[in-house]
Image (cartoon, rainbow, N blue to C red):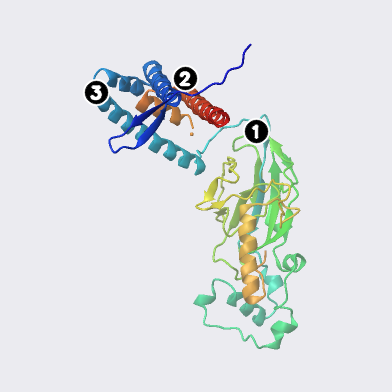
Amino acid sequence: MIPFPIHSQKSDISSENGGDKTIDHGEFNEKENGRQSLRELWWEFLSETTCHGLGKVGSMRRNRLRGILWMVFLITSMSTIIWFLVDEVRSYYSYPYLSKTSLETFKRMPFPAVTICNMGSKNKSRSSKTEKDELYWLSISSMSVFSSKRVNWTDSYYEENGYFEPISLEQELSMGMDVSKFILSSAFDFMGELEFEPILTSLGVCYTWNGDGKATTKMSGSLYNLHLILDINRELYEAGLTTSTGVKVIVHEPGTIADPINQGFTVAPGVSVLASVSKKRFTFLPYPFHAFVEDYCLDTMAPDFINKFHPLPYSVGACKKFCFAEKIFKRCGCVQVGDLASIGGQMGLFIGASVLTIMEFIEIIFLLLFFILKRLSSKHRNSLENADI
């Protein structure tokens, strides 16, 4: 082999003003070939794509007006789909949700806890030994607005008898109705002698059955489940928080705190009442789904969740009572007793696109990038060869 130098072909062309201009024919031909290849690649894509509008734009070669009209239609449709895509993304990140309701059946149904409260929880024969005692209970009851009598709070009698001290469950029991005279008879599915646990509430002492949730049943109807015969002992009523007489019945989840002020129903004396019960269980979505406008649900099942009511389970009612008691304590130092498928639809509607069309766009983008890189590489190689020469 005989080595020989390679020279680029150049021409000198004189301009009208007498200047000289040098043109590199190799570079000129390369640019022309590049433009031709890019143009052919683009027209080939327009003629073969399954995206309807782009194919129509290809008619510009034959009819310029028709091609321009289709280009306007295509730009309008593309603008519309972009608007819809932005709206869909915004909708997705707003975390929309639907309420789902399902019905479950059980061979044996867990029975709820039942709490009963005598609306007159204080036994007058136990709680009022003097007229001052009776006046005290009247002054803190809902009947005080109808009475002209007022307590002399500076009287040492009330301080000496512990009226300004916290009241315990034992003290409330000593002043309350005798449970054996209140609950005369109790039975569950024909099994009698049920055990009721005394609890301290805002209505005084109430009594809860099935607080541990162990009772289950497969019976329904008025002959089965829980039966109670109660005597409110109306003649022994002391003035209390309410002006009602009768019994407050609260049906609630076992293990939760009964709230006789905000929950339950009242049974008037001298009547028989049949109450049917159905259970509803709500499961709320965790973060980032909104629950209370801009707030989020509290995940009470999370391992790092701290339950203020342990060992009792967390409940909305208990949380409300706790917050209410906290505010009262801070104020006066005391507490009260006790969709991304719709995107495909929009694309198909406005630009006739599908998954295959998306792949075509990916292909043309890849080919364009490859073409640009190839051009840059070729220019760089030519510049090095010219420098060597």
Compute the Cα span from label 1 to label 3: 82 Å
- Is the N terminus in the top left, top right, bottom left or bottom right quadrant? top right
Residue 327, image x, y percentages: 62, 69
- Compared across the picture, whether 367 is left or right of 240 comes to left
| Number of the label disc, if any, that sits on residue 219 | 1
Q: Nearer the viewer, residue 36 or 179?
A: 36
Q: Residue furthest top?
A: 1
Residue located at (65% from left, 81% from top): 131
Residue occupied by mark 2: 356
Labelled disc at residue 79: none
Report the side of 219 relative to 214 (left or right).
Answer: left
Residue at image position (60%, 75%) is: 140
Q: Amino acid at mark 1?
A: Met
- Viewer-side residue, 189 vs 75: 75
Q: Secondary structure at mark 2?
A: helix
Marks 2 and 3, the one that precedes in the sequence: 3
- Please determine whether, in this image, residue 221 is positioned above or below residue 156: above
Q: Earlier in the sequence, mark 1 or mark 3?
A: 3
Amino acid type at mark 2 = Leu
